Amino acid sequence: MAEIISAPPHGRPALVLNADFRPLSYYPLSLWPWQEVVKAVFLDRVDIIAEYDYVVRSPSTEFRLPSVIALRDFVRQDRPPAFTRFNVFLRDGFACAYCGTHENLTFDHVVPRSKGGRTTWENIVAACSPCNLRKGGKLLRDCDVHLQHKPFRPNNYQLQEIGRKFPPHHLHDTWMDYLYWDVELES
């Protein structure tokens, strides 16, 4: 039996799928708060794919709160990803490009600005504070740090594939069929 509560359904976001039933985003996972979901349902912009065991009411209607929705119209995702600190960290797997640690991350210009380096995808890497300080304003050939991978301009597909390796802290059971996490299947 569905839970009927008069309090707002906090903590019950819906997984948002594109019209092709793939998440709009893996990292951060495409989630909408319940208020946005209810609005989209009533505006007929989404299809309900799965529901929580939780009923919401208005004076004129009552329905189970959606846990997975799919957009009716396909949203193209072919624009280049934004060049942001978060996306640089995501591209680099939230690890220092020099030593691989996940602690105290900042970012570093591989070719320092003082030596003509630019702030671009191809010249910025995630770096931990100790490696960043050790490298300082020097070129790689002049210091004792080495890149584990060459920085590159990722596309949305590459960032989404990397993001799939970082599952969110909360996954509702109804979401699992739509998230293709790298889990070993039982034989």
Image: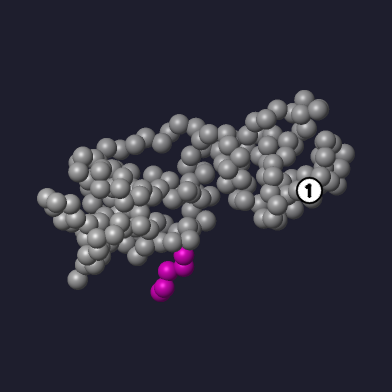
Looking at the picture, the colour scheme in use is one colour
Image: 182 above or below 23: below
Q: At 63% from the left edge and 34% from the top edge, which residue is drawn?
A: 121
Q: At 62% from the left edge and 51% from the top edge, which residue is drawn?
A: 94
Residue projecting furthest to the bottom:
187
Tell me which segment is drawn in magenta. 182-187
Q: Amino acid at mark 1?
A: Cys
Q: How many marks?
A: 1
Residue 91 is situated, as x and y percent measured from the top left of the image, at 59, 44
Q: At 41% from the left edge and 61% from the top edge, which residue is drawn?
A: 171
Residue 145 is situated, as x and y percent measured from the top left of the image, at 81, 47
What residue does disc 1 label? 131
Residue 187 appears in the picture as rendered: yes
Image: 31 above or below 183: above
Residue projecting furthest to the left:
60
Q: Is residue 184 magenta?
A: yes
Of residues 86 and 2, which is closer to you in this image? 2
Residue 175 is situated, as x and y percent measured from the top left of the image, at 35, 59
Q: Is residue 61 left or right of residue 101?
A: left
Picture quarter with the N terminus: bottom left
Residue 176 appears in the picture as rendered: no
Mark 1 lies on a secondary structure that is: helix
Of residues 12 and 175, which is closer to you in this image? 12
Q: At 53% from the left edge and 50% from the top edge, which residue is drawn?
A: 162
Q: Is residue 37 magenta?
A: no
Q: Is residue 128 left or right of residue 153?
A: right
Image: 157 above or below 116: below
Picture quarter with the C terminus: bottom left
Q: Is residue 122 left or right of residue 51?
A: right
Q: Main secondary structure of the magenta part?
A: loop
Of residues 117 and 182, which is closer to you in this image? 117
